[in-house]
Image (cartoon, coloured by chain):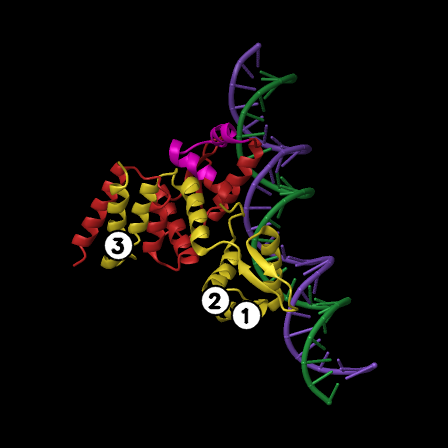
Chain colours: A red, B yellow, C green, D purple
Amino acid sequence: MPSTPRPTDAELAILRVLWDRGPSTVRQVFEVLLEERELGYTTVLKMLQIMDEKGLVRRDGSDRTHIFTARHTQSQTQQHMLTDLLDKAFGGSAKSLVMQALATRRASREELDEIRKLIDQAEGGKP
Amino acid sequence: MPSTPRPTDAELAILRVLWDRGPSTVRQVFEVLLEERELGYTTVLKMLQIMDEKGLVRRDGSDRTHIFTARHTQSQTQQHMLTDLLDKAFGGSAKSLVMQALATRRASREELDEIRKLIDQAEGGKP
DNA sequence: TGAGATCAACGAAAATCTTCGTAATCGGTT
DNA sequence: AACCGATTACGAAGATTTTCGTTGATCTCA
């Protein structure tokens, strides 16, 4: 149960890179982010320093070029942010959150089938 | 489609009051929030002024005591924040968001049934 | 070995968020 | 009319977020 703060938008962009590409150097993260938007190398460095202080990433400084790793998995972070949103905007109701999410119409038939299977499982295990 | 910014945590607390109790004065919002945490009257006033500038609330200043109203419904705001989270933390996959949400184990059997019905409907209407 | 490239650290600036004190204004009451 | 309480407006301070320039250290290789 991670007690780290909820990542900000910019922090999340960095975490996405670390989740996708695994442990990375500042430069590697910088290059990926540069494809999406303009920003400076030292901006990324500073962000990673702050994220290290916050506990969002871990740093290996044994080499001259430090390696940064996301401290929590994407799943853990998703869970964290979802719970936060659930409490702050959905009055704690997972049902209404899921209904709204399904209303975004981004799920394909196959995905809906998988979701239904998950519900069946959940109900099966909940007598 | 509201092009207002995503509300901050403090703004969301105020919006919750407006959604629950309808159009309200600063004092009314203040009194409700005071039950949850300590804060000053002018803090709430200032927040509402800023939220008015941002377009998050509408203000009726025809009377001396102004009345504030949420500019978007709770549903619209939920949709907005969910879409934002979807893109920034779930790679746009509604499926994985729903799966994670269901994993919070906050939904009862009855709620799961309702969700499944919604999926059935969605699939029925999707050729 | 020394010149140039790469890197981390530091500090600081601009923007945003959150908080509230103080002052000005208005309404109702004496 | 003068006062009192309630309300809005203003401005500012502290915290956080996002950004980057500069500096000094370290590495590479010619």
Instruction: Specify which label sits upstream in the sequence, 3 or 2.
Output: 2
Could you say which disc has been placed on residue B21 in the image? 2
The residue under the point 58% across, 55% down is B51
Q: B85 and A99: which one is in front? A: A99
Q: CA distance from mark 1 to mark 2?
A: 9 Å
How many residues crowd around disc 1 within 10 Å: few (fewer than 14), some, or many (20 or more)?
Answer: some
Q: Amino acid at mark 3?
A: Glu
In front here: C13 or D28? Answer: C13
- Determine which residue is flagged by label 1: B28
Q: Position of residue A112 (x, y in %)?
A: 26, 42
- Find disc 3 in the rendering and name its residue: B114
Q: Dot 3 lies on which element?
A: helix
Circle 1 sits in a helix, a strand or a loop, which is it? helix
Query: Could you tell me which residue is drawn at 45 percent across and 64 percent down?
Result: B20
Residues at marks 1 and 3, CA–CA distance in whole angstroms? 35 Å
Residues at discs 1 and 2 in contact (Cβ within 8 Å): yes
